[in-house]
Amino acid sequence: MNRQELMETIKAYQPFNEQEEMDKALILNWIETQENAFSRDNTVAHMTASAWVVNKDRSKVLMVYHNIYHSWSWLGGHADGETDLLAVAIREVKEEAGISSVRPVSEEIFSLESLTVDGHVKRGNYVSSHLHLNVTYLLEADSEECVSVKEDENSGVAWFSPEEALKKSTEPWFVERVYGKLVEKMKKHG
């Protein structure tokens, strides 16, 4: 998917709530006005892709214990120049959880978010506070497949019930505005 196709897909996306409506406008504007919107070289904001990974019967959600945020969280990562954000989300799940078999429940966007990232040290270098303009996809994996940590990014990989997942995260804004929304949307998605 090229940049223009992604923009058309985002334009066609029906926001779930006011947060998504506001963030959709922000994301579209950023892609339209910033040549390097998909690169970490843009230190103000850049595109990312996340995955809400569920098992076949939707009774479990895959999460990682994120080393920077010190919390259980969803999986995902930077676009790093790639405009096919579904491919980015799938790649990140495979890398972060050590699983080989993950597929989209749908190739449609599952949610949109503008996420604040506090300043932090990564690989010995300071990274200033910035925004992740994020596209989320609903993916499916086998909860029986062996998982493994990616030591430079996380220190735990586990499946939780959706309710447990909300309790495991120690980031209140994420629980309230993102993960809670994803659990609610997942129930409607079947």
Image (tube, rainbow, N blue to C red):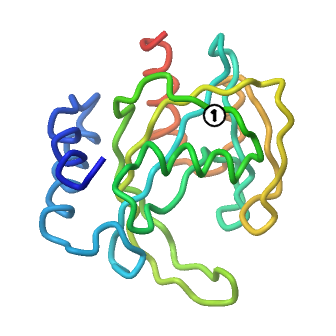
- Left or right of 33 in this view: 119: right
Name the residue nearer the viewer: 16 or 43: 43
Write down the quadrant of residue 109 in the picture: top left
Name the residue: 76% across, 31% down. 159
Name the residue nearer the viewer: 102 or 155: 102
Write down the quadrant of residue 166 in the picture: top right
Name the residue nearer the viewer: 177 or 37: 37
Name the residue: 64% across, 47% down. 73
Classify 78 as above or below 41.
Answer: above
Whole-percent x and y of residue 43? 37, 81
- Left or right of 78 in this view: 143: right
**Please, which residue is most extreme toward the front here?**
1
Classify 158 as above or below 46.
Answer: above
Name the residue: 13% across, 62% down. 32
Name the residue: 82% across, 50% down. 156
Write down the quadrant of residue 27 in the picture: bottom left
Q: Residues within 10 Å of mark 1 (few under 14, many from 20)?
A: many
Residue where numbered disc 1 is placed = 166
The three-letter amino acid code for the residue at tag 1 is Leu
- Left or right of 63 in this view: 147: right
Q: Secondary structure at mark 1?
A: helix
Whole-percent x and y of residue 131? 38, 67
Name the residue nearer the viewer: 56 or 169: 56
